[in-house]
Structures are given as structure tokens and as C-alpha cells.
Image (cartoon, rainbow, N blue to C red):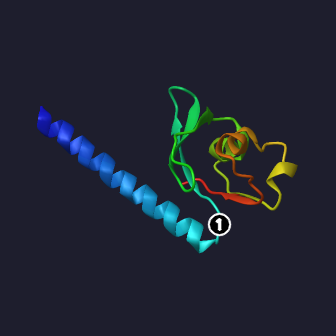
Amino acid sequence: PDTEKADRLKKAQELSSVFTTIVDDAYQLVNASRATIWLVDHEKGEIWSRVSTGYKDEIRIASSTGIAGSCVQTGKVIVLDDAYSDPRFHPEVDKLTGFRTRSLITVPI
């Protein structure tokens, strides 16, 4: 029924609001230039950007790709002072967004 659809839509909007709050608070807390929440799509074997500062389009990459993918695979926090010096780093996202990542903190949530 339409009631179930409306309930699902309301919950999705609430979740989006929670994600936006997390991103906004987190990137201000650590004085970051950008922040993204990546969600795992197990069926497709991908991670995708649910909420991101500075870039509005959705980004999808293999869940085994990049620092975010490594964080997904290991469940561990990853801190890098120089992203480009780490072989796990996936510079294609920077090429897509036009942003150059320097240092980063990746945290599984």
C-alpha cells in the first residue's frame, strides 16, 4: 500500500539527514576539506558515496578499491599523512571530483 511506501520514504529521508549530520560534524571536528560516507552494496560488490561534501554526484567503486575499500575489507581505521604514497589509494576518485586528496582518515561505521 501507499502507506508502506510513504513510511519507507520517510525513513530514507531521516537516514539521509543523519548521514548529512555525521559528515558535517565529522569534517568540521577534524578540520577536513572534504568528507564522504561510503555505503556497501554487497550484491554489486561496490561501495558508493551516500553523502559527500564538495561533490554532489554519486560515486561507485569496487568494494576492494582504494582506502575506503580497504577500510571496508579490514574494518580498521586508516590514517594517512600522504594519500598518494600509499599503494591502496585510488586516484581515480580525485580525477573524477577535481579534488586532490592529501591526508585522510577513514573510519568504518
Provide residue 21's location: percent of width, then percent of height: 44, 63
Q: Residue at x 65, y 63 (%)?
A: 33
Hey, which residue is sitting farthest right in the picture? 85
Provide residue 46's location: percent of width, then percent of height: 58, 32
Hey, which residue is sitting farthest top in the picture? 44
Quadrant that contains the N terminus = top left
Q: Taking 12 as reference, is 93 left or right?
A: right
Q: Quadrant of residue 64?
A: top right
Q: Quadrant of residue 102?
A: bottom right
Of residues 91 and 1, the one nearer the viewer is 91
Secondary structure of the residue carrying tag 1 is loop
Q: Residue at x 59, y 53 (%)?
A: 108
Q: Which residue is mark 1?
A: 32
Q: Residue at x 72, y 59 (%)?
A: 104
Q: Residue at x 68, y 41 (%)?
A: 93
Q: What's under tag 1, amino acid-wise?
A: Ala
Hey, which residue is sitting farthest front in the picture? 98
Residue 93 vertical placement versus 16 (above, below):
above
Label 1 neighbourhood size at 10 Å, few (<14), some (14-19), many (20+)? few
Of residues 92 and 62, the one nearer the viewer is 92
Provide residue 34's location: percent of width, then percent of height: 62, 59
